Structure formats: structure tokens, C-alpha cells
Image (cartoon, rainbow, N blue to C red):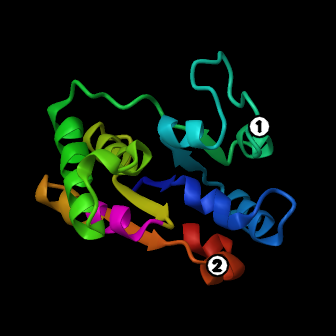
Amino acid sequence: MTTVYVADTGVFVRCGGPDKEKFQRLRRALKQADVALHIPQRVYEELGGDPAADEYPSGNIPYPDGFEEGWIVVAEELDYTNPLISTVMDEARRFIANETDRNEDLIEKADTALVGLAAQLIDTDQADSVVLLTTDKPAGRAAETLLPEHGFRGRIEYRYVSVDYLNAITAAEFR
């Protein structure tokens, strides 16, 4: 069974940067478990990368080692022509807006891209299941609520990445 781990910008922000213990703990856990964090291109942009560049990393991204070492991977562009992906992303935007009492137009595209990427990975058989690591509780709840409605019951898990989570993370989290 293939499990793919998808992460949002907040995970890296909460780590505090490559010179911080939380970042190094996450790095060690992923490398020891031999898994990678997949990030949507929108998240890559938020981290300072340029998805139009020929090679990752680019720009002033503060986490180049993660890309070079292979434990952070930029996912393929989302296939917006796939009705499932566009529908799930629209539903996620509405869900997050309702949960946060904000206008749908103010919902960050990276938040909906997390849910879209999870759906795309499962729909295209690149993953049997997806674990979404996020600091954004509404986005996590959107994924766990919406994807089962589209036939992906039991195939998505959301983990809230708190400071305590990062302080205690080990390779066992990814096995």
C-alpha cells in the first residue's frame, strides 16, 4: 500500500527554518523512514520557489537541502481539466470559507491545492492513501470531509502539525 505525505507551507514555517531543531527532527524522521513530503506547486511558490524554473529549487527558497536530498518533492501541476480535481477544490474553498467565516474569494489557493493534490494522487493511482500534514485545521477538515464524499473513504488522513507534534516526531510517524 502506497501512502503519500502532503505538506503545507505552515509545516515549514512552524519548523522555524533549517537551523532549528524542529526542522532537523522532521528531516531525520523523513530520511530514516525513506519517505518524502510532497507539496503542491502553490505551496512551493509560497516558500519562495519559482515553478517555472527548469530545476527545483529556485529563487530564494529557504529549504534547498530538502529538495536536493529528496525529502521534499514538488508535485506535478494539478490537472484542472479533471472534473474531480476542480470540483474538490471548489468544495474545499467553500468548506474553508464556511469554517472560518470568510469570503470564498479570500481563501488561499494553496489551501485548496492541498485538497486537490490529495484527490489527484488517489484518483490517478499514485497513492492508495494520503496523509495531509498541515497547520491549517480547516483545510485538514475539508480534506477528511470532502474526499470520502467522492469515493475516497478511508484513504485520507489529516494530521495537525503542532509544535508538540514536531518536537516529538520520529520515523515511526511515517511507517
Q: Which residue is mark 2?
A: 163
Task: Locate residue 121, reporting x and y percent.
Answer: 35, 43
Say above or below: 83 vs 1: above
Query: Dot 2 lies on which element?
Result: helix
- Give the position of the C terminus as an image quadrant: bottom right
At a point 27% along the width and 28% down the height, the residue shown is: 80
- The amino acid sitting under disc 2 is Val
Say above or below: 20 vs 6: below
Query: Dot 1 lies on which element?
Result: helix
Q: Magenta-highlighted stretch: main secondary structure?
A: helix
Magenta-tinted stretch: 136-143
Relative horizontal placement of residue 66, taking residue 96 as reference (left or right): right
Relative horizontal placement of residue 128, taking residue 87 as reference (left or right): right
Q: Which residue is mark 1?
A: 68
Task: Locate residue 75, reporting x and y percent.
Answer: 49, 36
At a point 87% along the width and 60% down the height, the residue shown is: 19
At a point 65% along the width and 66% down the height, the residue shown is: 14
Q: Quadrant of residue 153?
A: bottom left
Q: For the image shown, how many numbered marks are present on the structure?
A: 2
- The amino acid sitting under disc 1 is Glu
| Structural crowding at the residue carrying mark 1, measured as other residues with C-alpha within 10 Å and reported as few (<14), some (14–19) or many (≥20) | few
Relative horizontal placement of residue 125, taking residue 169 as reference (left or right): left
The answer to whether the residue labelled 2 contacts the one labelled 1, judged by CB atoms less than 8 Å apart, is no
Q: Quadrant of residue 157?
A: bottom left
Cα–Cα span, label 2 and label 1: 25 Å
- Give the position of the N terminus as an image quadrant: bottom left
Q: Is residue 43 visible?
A: yes
Relative horizontal placement of residue 35, taking residue 160 as reference (left or right): right
